[in-house]
């Protein structure tokens, strides 16, 4: 499946010296991404991404800054909610065949965001799209949006269930065991 916002980069073209590329989604790509991420609109999406080989050339470091503006849907009122994204990201990509098959795997802090790269290469547009979606508010709420009273919890639900009222009338299932204890 072809990503909506594709900017492929051949792994063979990445060296030890960092290179920076800027990518920007076209209006057609933004419309497709808006549909994918369930947005009312995606007004702009740009990313400035730096790539370089690390760890003896076996892995690729991908880091950058994403900037975007979208319109989400309020989870309460369904009203449009403008969203601005300014986000940094950093990941390390490695070959799938470079992973050990058996035994223990030592994971360091640097390996926290280690991901395999696809055989066809690294797609800077897809990476930007994924990190953009992660930076969006998962529960956007319009200013002043209130949950209707019909959906508000009752006082007992809001305070939690109180079982002390039934404690005296409810028999204790362990009361019969009290007589079996040894008396010294």
Image (cartoon, grey):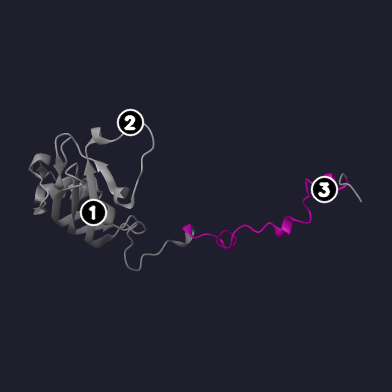
Residue at mark 2: 101
In the displayed orientation, state which residue is furthest to the front.
56
Q: Position of residue 24 (x, y in %)?
A: 10, 53
Observer-nearest of 161 and 11: 11
C-alpha separation, residue under disc 2 versus residue under disc 3: 56 Å
When the figure is inspected, residue 99 is found, relative to residue 143, above or below; the finding is above
Residue at mark 1: 90
Q: Residue at x 14, y 54 (%)?
A: 49
Observer-nearest of 123 and 11: 11
C-alpha separation, residue under disc 1 versus residue under disc 2: 26 Å
Observer-nearest of 5 and 111: 111
Whether residue 179 is visible, yes or no, is: yes
Whether residue 34 is visible, yes or no, is: no
Q: Point out the stretch of residues depicted in magenta.
A: 151-179
- Residue 175 is marked as 3
Q: Position of residue 170 (x, y in %)?
A: 77, 51
Question: In the image, is 155 to the left or to the right of 85?
Answer: right
Q: Are marks 2 and 3 in contact (CB under 8 Å)?
A: no
- Crowd band around label 3 with a 10 angstrom C-alpha radius: few (<14), some (14–19), many (20+): few
Badge nearest the viewer, 2 or 3: 2
Q: Quarter-wise, where is residue 177 in the image?
A: top right
Badge nearest the viewer, 1 or 2: 2
C-alpha separation, residue under disc 1 versus residue under disc 3: 60 Å
Q: Quarter-wise, where is residue 63 in the image?
A: bottom left
Q: Quarter-wise, where is residue 99 in the image?
A: top left
């Amino acid at each position: 499946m072809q990503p909506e916002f594709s900017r492929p980069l051949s792994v063979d073209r990445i060296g030890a010296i960092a290179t920076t590329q800027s990518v920007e989604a076209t209006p057609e790509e933004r419309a497709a991404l808006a549909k994918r991420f369930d947005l009312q609109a995606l007004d702009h999406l740009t990313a400035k991404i730096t790539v370089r080989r690390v760890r003896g050339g076996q892995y690729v470091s991908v880091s950058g800054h994403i900037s975007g503006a979208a319109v989400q849907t309020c989870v309460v009122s369904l009203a449009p909610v403008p969203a601005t994204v300014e986000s940094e990201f950093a990941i390390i990509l490695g070959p799938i065949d470079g992973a050990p098959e058996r035994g223990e795997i030592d994971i360091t802090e640097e390996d926290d965001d280690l991901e395999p790269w696809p055989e066809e290469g690294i797609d800077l547009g897809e990476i930007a799209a994924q990190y953009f979606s992660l930076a969006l508010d998962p529960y956007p709420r319009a200013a002043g949006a209130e949950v209707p009273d019909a959906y508000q919890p009752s006082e007992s639900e809001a305070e939690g269930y109180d079982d002390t009222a039934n404690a005296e009338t409810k028999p204790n299932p362990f009361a019969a065991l009290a007589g079996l204890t040894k008396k010294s």
